[in-house]
Structures are given as C-alpha cells and as structure tokens.
Image (cartoon, coloured by chain):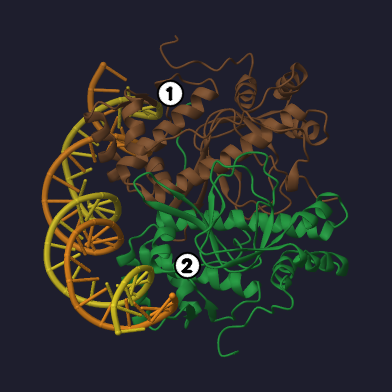
Chain colours: A green, B brown, C yellow, D orange
DNA sequence: CGCTTCTTTGACGAGCCTCAAACTGAGTGG
DNA sequence: CCACTCAGTTTGAGGCTCGTCAAAGAAGCG
C-alpha cells in the first residue's frame, strides 16, 4: 500500500498541519500538542461541496487534513477563475474576517477538516506566540502565492505557467510532507488546471504533452513527477523566496506628469 | 483654473485620506483630527522612485496624499506585471509586516505621502476603534481589488479588461473625492496600462480606440471620461463590492496584530 | 459492461503580439 | 521662435499563441 504516495497517517490526522506550520516557525511541544488535539473536531466534505460562499457570512476557521480545495469566482457566463488551491495542512478563514467572504471555496476532492478555533484562540490570546508567528508567516506566504499566480496569468506563456505552477505545487506539498522532491499527488482535472491558469482545457492538454515529450514531467492517474526541476525552473523563472534584493531592473519606470 | 479636475486642497492635505476611510467606516471627530495631524510628517517622492523593494525590509506605513504609485514585479527578461495602483487616500505598509515586502512599490508620478504611524498606533492601541475598523475594511477592499484584477487577467478579454479597469478606477477615485461620476484623472501611459492588464502596448491602444469609437469613453491628456458607465458595466460584468456597512461589534483585530 | 467523466487529437479561426514606422505634443536650447 | 529631441501614441502588416468546435479514445464507476 506504500506503492502509492506517502499515505496520510490516519492515526495522526493533524501531523500535516503541524509539519507545515513548523516550516514557517518553530512550535513548542505544547503548541504542537494543541494542534494535535484539534483532531476531536473534525468534519468531512464531499467533492464539489462549498466550504464558503463569496459574499456570504464568514466561515469557521479550519485546517485541511486531507483532500484539496480551491478558491474561485465564477462569471455570469460560466467562465471561472481559480485563485489558488488549498492543500492538506493549509488553513482557511483563519483571520476571523468580520466581513463577507471574498471568494467561494469549493472542495475539489473529498475533504477532511479540523476546527482551527482553539488554535486561533491560543495564538491571539498570547498563549502561543510561536504558533501565532507561524500562522502569520503562513498567511503571508499565501499572499505571495496569489501574487505569483497573478504574474503567471498576466505575463507568462502557457508553457511557463504550467511549469511554474507544477513547481509551486511540488514545493508546497513537500513542505507539508506529502510527496518528495519529484513526485507528488495531483488530483486535478485538466479543466481545473485550465481555470486556474487562465487557459482552455485543450491548450492545457497540449502544453502538458509538450512538457512530457521533452522529458520534463510525467503525469499519470493523479500523480505528477517532475523529472527535471532544474530545467523547469529555468523555463518558468521559478524562485522560492524572492531573491534578497539588488536586481537592477532593465526597464525604465514611471512618468513625469504632475500628480493627479 | 478649475478647468482641470478637482484640485487637491493644499490646505487640507489629509482630507483625501479622511474621506476615503470614512467611506469604509465612520470616524469620530477625534479620529479625523488625528488623521489631519499627520500633515506634519510629509514626504515627497519623484516619479519613478521606489517606495519599497520586493524582498527588502518592511517600509514605513504611509498614506498617499497626492500622486499615483503601483505595486509591481519585474521578470528577469524585463516583462513586468503591475499588481495594482495606489491612489491618493490609499495607504501602504499599514499591516506592520515583520517580513520582507512582497512587492516593489514605485511612484508613477510625483508623490506626496504622510507617515501613518501615529494613526496605526492609535488604532492598534484600542484608542480609535472606528479608525481601526476603517483600516481593516480598507485592507480587505484592497484584497478584493487584487482578486478582481486576477479575474481580469485570467478570464476576461482585452476589451473587458480595459472597461472593467476603468470602472474600478472611476469608483475608487470618486470615493476618495477625486473626479466625479464620469470624469477622473488618469495619469498613466498606455505602457503602464499594458503592464497592469497583461496586454501589449499596441493592443491596449487599439482597445482604447475601440471604446472611443463606440462612444463609451474619452481620453485626453491625463483625464478619462466614462460616457456610458451602464454599458461599460455590462461589457465587463462590473459589480461593486458590497458596502462594508454591516460591520459587527468591536472584536480583536485578528492575526494582523503582531504576536505577543 | 454501459455510462459518464476525462483526456487526447485534428482542423480552423480569432485574439493578441511583434516589428516597424509615422505621427503628436511637450519640452529644450540655439 | 524655430528646430530638435524624446516620450508617448497611433497605424499597418504579418504571424504565433491560444481558443473553439468536434469527435474519437481512455478510464473510472455502479
């Protein structure tokens, strides 16, 4: 049964969360225990179910223990834009929004979540500063992902977009302890990829085939393999953390008209 | 002399900020006065100057009093993606980030700013709950703009993108008290529009011409006029975000405040 | 198995990009 | 006051990327 990718230990459902948050900031034993105890308040969702509705009331804060979800918006004519994916270990609705949700959240697979309320309580109450920092860093990272996604949509070709996106998923999943430096689960249809990357299904398919043909990736039955991360990184200009600084931009910027 | 658009009252440099924040949440007289007193600590930037560098240290929190700026990222080959624009009345670096900046911020025109530190101090210290709510709502609105922009880039045609973007600017500027229901200042070159909308300069030009030809907009010397907002709205599926009216009781500020 | 969902392939067209050059307008300096 | 320059806008021609339409394979699933 380990022929597949690393099985989530059903015995330690919150290990993914712990692992991911520890990657952002060190957690004390007590904080880790606090997280593990969230196992009491679990909840399941079916694929396709909405975890939150855009414009609707703020959802409960949760961590995802298994399964994938996405944030999205749908235009009246049916066009859909997916803003990003929620993977095991990720949380959502963690910032206690007082206002309506900004995006719809939909389960893309069967999903298991845990109530994050106690963890938030502790973090905000000052009783778990390491956890608080980890959550802040995670939220910040999520914002970074949104910006990366925007660059893909606005300024990268289909080929670059797909490469960049796969590298991003690989990294996120490895941090969470799912998948390794090459292989990771990818339970997304090409339609979903298309709606995330701003492409048509057909073109996603052709782009994937090109990457396969060139020996850069493999894709079968829900598992992706990056055969040449180096090369993929070059193609997509993929960088983990924004480079320290000092990249002189070759392009002139700004104009000299008077202020508005 | 008022042949141009509404002149910023140089006598009340912070009025734009007050006006914009009041649109998000009511402000007490004391809170408004607090904002107006920020006029002491002003600073000027030249067009093209960087107000913050991606990956660099967190910038000081500021409000923009006049002029436009943008958040952007530049790829190694020179391609640029503009994430959004900062208009008079807007603030930036307000969330006291402990981590490096996520985007570069560049002045697109000559710019005047005010130090927002005292206002943040008061808001976070619980001495100005109305202001705190306004700032939160403003931050949330900014996130909404980012998502709107993403939909434009991923799932709208050039024609729709331009229409949607112009409507968004019109709305933001009217709220801030600049421009009216039709006219507003637009100190952007077509190159900047292109880099924001994920298009080429040439195509932006052609798209603008089409909108002009159809009698929907007018553009001359830094001023935009929306001749038919209704029609533009249909084209772009433009919808205003629901007003932040129903802001519930005073509550913790969430994860935005720094950990103990 | 028979159905549905997903993937793959081909043919064709459209949207948008690139290259190139002409045009406009606002400085700038002789 | 008139070149002259330079940034920005506009226009044309041609081509590549990507979308649409259509239909034929795979692949999961009851």
Question: Where is residue B43 drawn, in percent x and y?
Answer: 66, 30
Q: Residues within 10 Å of mark 1 (few under 14, many from 20)?
A: many
Q: What residue lies at 31% left-to-right and 29% top-to-bottom?
A: B231
Q: Position of residue B57 (x, y in %)?
A: 69, 51
Please give the residue where the numbered disc 2 appears in the rendered image. Answer: A164
Which residue lies most toward the top here? B1
Based on the displayed image, in which of its 4 quarters is residue A132 positioned?
bottom right
Q: Nearer the viewer, residue B204 or B107?
A: B204
Give the side of residue B233 with respect to residue B15, left or right.
left
Residue under label 1, please give it.
B184
Using the numbered discs, state the Cα–Cα distance from disc 1 to disc 2 in whole angstroms.
Answer: 38 Å
Horizontal relation, residue B119 to residue B56: left or right: right
Q: Is residue A67 left or right of residue B185?
A: right
| Residue in the picture at 64% in, 63% down | A90
Secondary structure of the residue carrying numbered label 2: helix
Q: Camera-side residue: A224 or B161?
A: A224
* Residue at the spot 41% in from the left edge and 58% down from the top edge: A195
Q: Position of residue A94 (x, y in %)?
A: 69, 52
Q: Are marks 1 and 2 on the same chain?
A: no
């Amino acid at each position: 049964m380990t022929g597949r990718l690393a099985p989530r230990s059903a015995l330690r459902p919150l290990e993914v969360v712990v692992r991911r948050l520890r990657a952002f900031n060190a957690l004390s034993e007590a904080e880790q225990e606090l997280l593990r105890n969230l196992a009491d308040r679990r909840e399941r969702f079916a694929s396709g179910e909405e975890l939150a509705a855009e414009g609707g009331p703020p959802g409960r804060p949760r961590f995802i223990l298994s399964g994938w979800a996405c944030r999205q918006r749908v235009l009246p004519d049916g066009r859909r834009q997916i803003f990003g994916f929620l993977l095991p270990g990720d949380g959502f609705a963690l910032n206690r929004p007082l206002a309506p949700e900004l995006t719809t959240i939909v389960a893309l697979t069967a999903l298991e979540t845990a109530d994050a309320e106690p963890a938030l309580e502790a973090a905000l109450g000052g009783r778990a500063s390491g956890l608080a920092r980890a959550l802040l860093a995670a939220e910040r990272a999520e914002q970074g992902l949104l910006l990366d996604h925007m660059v893909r949509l606005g300024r990268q070709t289909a080929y670059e977009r797909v490469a960049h996106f796969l590298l991003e998923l690989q990294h996120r999943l490895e941090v969470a302890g799912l998948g390794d430096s090459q292989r990771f689960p990818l339970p997304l249809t090409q339609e979903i990829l298309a709606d995330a990357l701003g492409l048509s299904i057909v073109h996603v398919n052709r782009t994937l085939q090109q990457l396969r043909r060139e020996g850069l990736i493999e894709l079968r039955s829900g598992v992706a393999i990056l055969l040449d991360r180096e090369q993929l990184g070059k193609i997509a200009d993929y960088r983990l953390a924004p480079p320290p600084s000092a990249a002189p931009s070759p392009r002139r910027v700004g104009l000299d008209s008077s202020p508005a």
